[in-house]
Image (cartoon, rainbow, N blue to C red):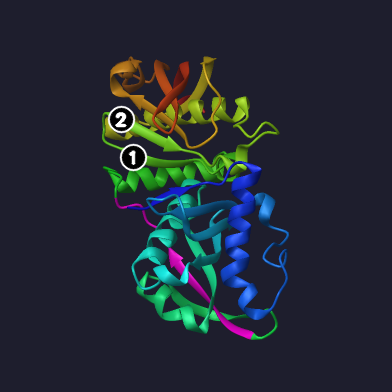
Amino acid sequence: MYTVEKPKTDEELKAYFAFRWLWLREPWGYPEGSEKDEYESVSEHRVLKNQSGKIVACGRVHLNTTEEAQIRHIAVDKEYRRKGVGQIMLNALEQVARDIGAERAVTNSRESSIEFFENCGFEIIDEAPNELGKLKRKQMRKHLFNNNNLVLHPKWCRELQKTWHEEIPITEHMGIKLYQYTERTIETHASLNKNINLHGSMFAGSIYSLATLTGWGMIFLQLKQKHLAGEIVLGDGSIHYHKPITMKPRAICNIETVRAKFDLLARGKKCPVSLHVDILDGDDQVAEFSGQYWVLPNASR
């Protein structure tokens, strides 16, 4: 049995870097410290431990752009190679990449690792700079898809995501994405890395923005279902913060909390909509948002 962990303490980080050096740099005669580079502070680091708590694999991921994550420094203890450990580590890093908003992952693979990455869904796209000045590498890419989420009416959902990015550009920079829509529930995710403050938690303003956009998205999709159209604006909103977000920002709005008079919109009048959005960090509820929106008929634009 293996567990994936994020090194947090100075001691855990020291053990992580020591493992990385042992398997990726020491065999080539490079001193300790050579395993680090300028991206360490903006990267997500992970280790894989066995039942005894021994590190048997490690790796890291960081964002190149808002859509692209780079996976690097996957190392596996020699005794655990060809036992599926490398794939467990890679899968964990890919999930981290999805969680921070990436749509694709890239890696610069040594020639000896190309087959491994190809078996995991990567494809060669270009040459990459030699590692350590001597090891030839290929740049490889994989598109990241989350097959576990349920999205009904995908055309509407794609239109919502596109509308967010084009009309509210900050959503793309914040890594806000529609994760799930079931006609009764909408769930959105945001990237913690793109909204992190000096305390290592999510900015309160970013949490508020995630909540208001989730409510906005619920109304957008409800209008589609009812074959109505209008301009959605936020009239008033209040939020209560209970705990900081330090892991995985999520927002959920259920249809049971939505109160709307859509018949007014059908008659060409502005429609009031009130709703409630729960903000979570993983599975823990950390904030509650109540919003009052208005949908203005298109004729008034």
Mark earlier in primary sequence (1, 2) = 1
Relative to the observer, which residue lies in front, 82 or 15? 15
Could you tell me which residue is drawn at 56 percent across and 25 percent down? 244
Residue underneath mark 1: 180
Asked whether the viewer can see residue 65, the reply is no
State which quadrant residue 90 falls in.
Answer: bottom left
Q: Main structural element of the magenta stretch: helix, strand or loop? A: strand
Q: What's drawn in magenta, residue-wise? A: 135-147
Q: Where is residue 48 in the image (x, y as percent from the top left)?
A: 45, 55
- What amino acid type is highlighted by mark number 1? Gln
Residue 83 location (% of width, % of height): 34, 69
Q: Compared to 163, does 91 lie above or below?
A: below
Q: Residue at x 32, y 35 (%)?
A: 224
Q: Return the residue nearer the eye: 254 or 261.
A: 254
Q: Mark 2 points at which residue?
A: 185
Q: Percent x, y for residue 121? A: 37, 70
Give residue 185's quadrant in the image.
top left
Magenta stretch: residue 146 in it? Answer: yes
